[in-house]
Image (tube, rainbow, N blue to C red):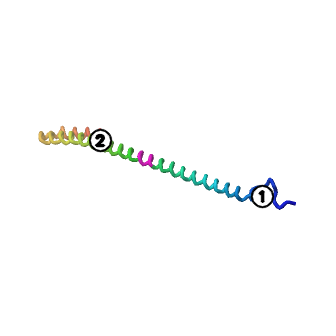
Amino acid sequence: MSRYRKNGPAFQTGSTPKLTLVVILAISFIAIVIVIARMALHNVQQKIQADAVDALQTVLQTTQDFINIASIELASICDRLIQLAEDFELDGILKLVAELENSK
C-alpha cells in the first residue's frame, strides 16, 4: 500500500509547492480585494463629503435669502409703523396689527 494516494488533496499527496502556491494566490487575491475595497470606500467618502458641502451651501443660501426677504418685509412694516406714529392714526395702527395677526 502506497503511503500517499495519487488523487488526494495536495496536503495528502505531499505536494507542498502546489499548496504553497494556492495559499499565496489566495492571500494575494484577498489583498487585492482589500485594496480595491479601500479605494472604493475612499471614493464614496469623498462623494459624500462633496454632497454634504453642496447641501450645506444650499441651506446657507436659502437661509440668507429668507433673512433678506424677511428684513425687507420687516423694514416695510417698520416704515408703515413710523408713518402711522407720525400721523398718530390709532385706527391705522390697530388695522396694521390686525393685518399682521391675520397673516401669521
Report the amino acid beneath label 1. Answer: Thr
Gap between marks 1 and 2, in whole Å? 78 Å
Q: How far from the left and from the top, in percent, is residue 56?
A: 37, 46
Against 89, is 28 above or below?
A: below
Identified at 21% across, 41% down, the residue is 75
Report the amino acid beneath label 2. Answer: Asp
- Dividing the picture into quadrants, the one containing residue 70 is top left
What span is colored magenta in the figure? 46-51
Q: Secondary structure at mark 2?
A: helix
Q: Quadrant of the N terminus?
A: bottom right
- Of circles 1 and 2, the one toward us is 1
Tell me which secondary structure the magenta stretch mostly adopts.
Answer: helix
- Binning the other alpha carbons within 10 Å of mark 1 as few (below 14), some (14 to 19) or many (20 upward) gives few
Q: Quadrant of the C terminus?
A: top left
Against 59, is 27 above or below?
A: below
Q: How far from the left and from the top, in percent, is residue 14?
A: 76, 60
Residue hosting label 1: 13
Q: How far from the left and from the top, in percent, is residue 32?
A: 57, 51
Identified at 58% across, 54% down, the residue is 31
Name the side, left or right, on which 29 lies relative to 98.
right
Looking at marks 1 and 2 on the same chain, the residue that comes earlier in the sequence is marked by 1
Q: Secondary structure at mark 1?
A: helix
Q: How far from the left and from the top, in percent, is residue 12?
A: 77, 59
Name the side, left or right, on which 76 lies relative to 42.
left
- Kindly check if marks 1 and 2 are in contact, taking CB atoms under 8 A apart as contact: no
| Residue 65 numbered mark, or none | 2
